[in-house]
Amino acid sequence: MVRTNRRVFLGATAATLALGGTAASKQSFEASSSDAGSGPWPQYQGDATNTGFTDAEGPGDYLDLDWKMDPDDLGYWGVRSGPVLVNGTLYFASMEEYYASDEEHWDGFVHAVDASDGSQNWRASVSARHDSSTVVVGGRVFVGDGALLALDAESGSELWRSDEKVLYSPTFADGTLYAATDSGVAAFDPADGSVEWTFDPATEDTDWEAETTPAVAGDTVYASITTRKRGALCALASDTGEERWRVEFSELPNDSSDSMYCSPPVVADGMAYVSAGSEDGERDLYAFDAETSDERWAVSGALQPTVAGDTVYAVANSGISAFDAETGDERWTTELGINGDLNVRGELVVASDRLYACTHSRLYVIDAETGEALDRASDTRDRQSMTNVSAAPAVGDGDAYVVTYGENDESTVYGITSADEPDVVNVSLDLEEDGPHCVDKPVAFEYDYEFDGNNYLGYREDAITEYEWKVDYGDGEETAYEVWESPGPDVEHIYDEPGRYEVEMTFRDEFGNTSAESTTVEIAECKGPIAQIETDPAEPTNLPRGTDVELTGSVRESDVDSETYEWDVDDDGDFEQEGQHVRVTIGEDRNNEKRTITLRVTDAAGETDTASVTVSSEYDEEYEGNC
């Protein structure tokens, strides 16, 4: 039903006092808003039809972080709705939290930021507006999620505020603002905030509510409405709010704990698209004839549609999918992340021939024609990834702008620009020990990695998990890429044959970009040492008491150098002396002494061998008599 709102007159009166005359204000606004819809990204999803498409250029195939705002310049909890871009300036709202008399309060700010460097032009204090993107047109900034508010785009000063509470982001089209409100769907005069009409979606038996940003195409406003278990799409006359048609979606089961959700509608080329279903579960994507409401097609498991040309892009259960806008036939599906398990946050955006999508901590650029993921941008400057990316980016002038939501040090705004080449991990590889290295023995390698000089451990361990890796040990053994798991594997290999081998360690990101480093290893046969002992005197038995015996250790038939010589000189099983030469005195304290002396040789490859010799003294009758 359509109802006339008596508060229209009251709102107009308040605006007259604020602006010095409603008629003059309307004329002034209309004269200054001839560029309505310019931007390149002046409102939610770029235009009044919510398509998420712009002819403007975004960043190219490779992405780089250009700048980031100081979190202290934002409200404590950051930004939850997408920014807009007009004439080189970003506009968005952030949320602030404060306590007074031990009670929690929520306020916020509206910001105007220089898109070239992130510096703040102005910040206006407002009530919490975190669920609304701004609309910038005619030198004014409009923001919802509360009483509809108009600010001066140059200074941030308040021009007017409506009596009507607006939910989510308003939409501007043909000189009028449209928005979901507590009362349904309303049309506002942007000159003074007066309500031109209000559509109440409720029926005799059902209290329908409008809770998403409407779309406007031609002379029709399209609005999603819901109850707890039901959802519908309505078409309204833009000048009167009269309902033209309504189509309902499948009702959720009564025993379900989920609530119904309908996305903001998208209208393009005579078709209206909307996703509907469980707020926390499965949703379907529908395409309707925008004039007749006839259903043209539907697909399951797709939500948040974006339309560019003859293609509908949607967030899917397994990533992002592209559908033929006329038939709903799937063209491609792309999964994001090295494991294909990253979920998209917010809506998709298409600029020219590239699609942009945000995950929890990344901005992705994707070939809109093929679905090939080309690159991702992340924050490497402050030793962390982007955290809690919360909405679709704004795109234009060759750049993209991403907002994050979270506690103070996690919330900021990023400017993303083009890079000349992909950002790859820098790898170093070397042998853990100098060698020698032997056939049939493990050879250990040590490695390290960093990202553009960022060697902070916490960031590295997080970022490297988005890479695959493999090692080619140079001996023809097949190796396959594996997904990295921190803190990283031990890298070692056993060679079957002696020789010189080129070893290469390679990292590969999800886009196929690789970075590699190599080293060489010499592998020897390593037969192992054969220990032998020489004595002086040459015959060390039956020696006079007190004779010194020199023992010299050596090896033969060894492929590698010997590292240690150890001696057991008292025949107790312990090797208590080291060195290639030792001296013992035989028969000094005992008559007719006899002992076995053992040498243990260990070579550089860790191989060991032992040799023994018997040393004895003669029997001395005088020694016995003296005892």
Image (spheres, rainbow, N blue to C red):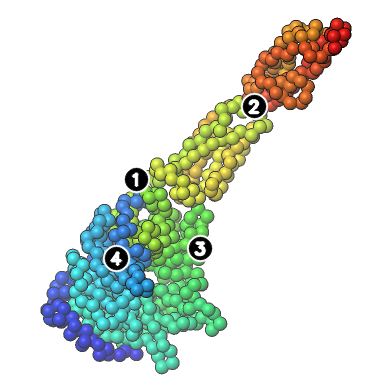
Within-10-Å neighbours for mark 3: few <14, some 14–19, many 20+: some
Residue type at mark 4?
Phe
Q: Earlier in the sequence, mark 2 or mark 3?
A: 3
Residue 420's label in the rendered image is 1
Q: Position of residue 384 (x, y in %)?
A: 41, 52
Q: Tell me the CA gap for discs 1 and 3.
A: 30 Å
Q: Position of residue 572 (x, y in %)?
A: 77, 24
Q: Which residue is mark 3?
A: 318
Task: Give the secondary structure at mark 2.
Answer: loop
Q: Are marks 2 and 1 in contact (CB under 8 Å)?
A: no
Q: Position of residue 212 (x, y in %)?
A: 37, 76
Q: Position of residue 113 (x, y in %)?
A: 25, 60
Q: Tell me the CA gap for discs 4 and 3.
A: 30 Å
Q: Tell me the CA gap for discs 2 and 1.
A: 48 Å
Task: Give the secondary structure at mark 4.
Answer: strand
Q: Are marks 1 and 3 in contact (CB under 8 Å)?
A: no
Q: Are marks 4 and 2 in contact (CB under 8 Å)?
A: no
Q: Which residue is mark 4?
A: 92
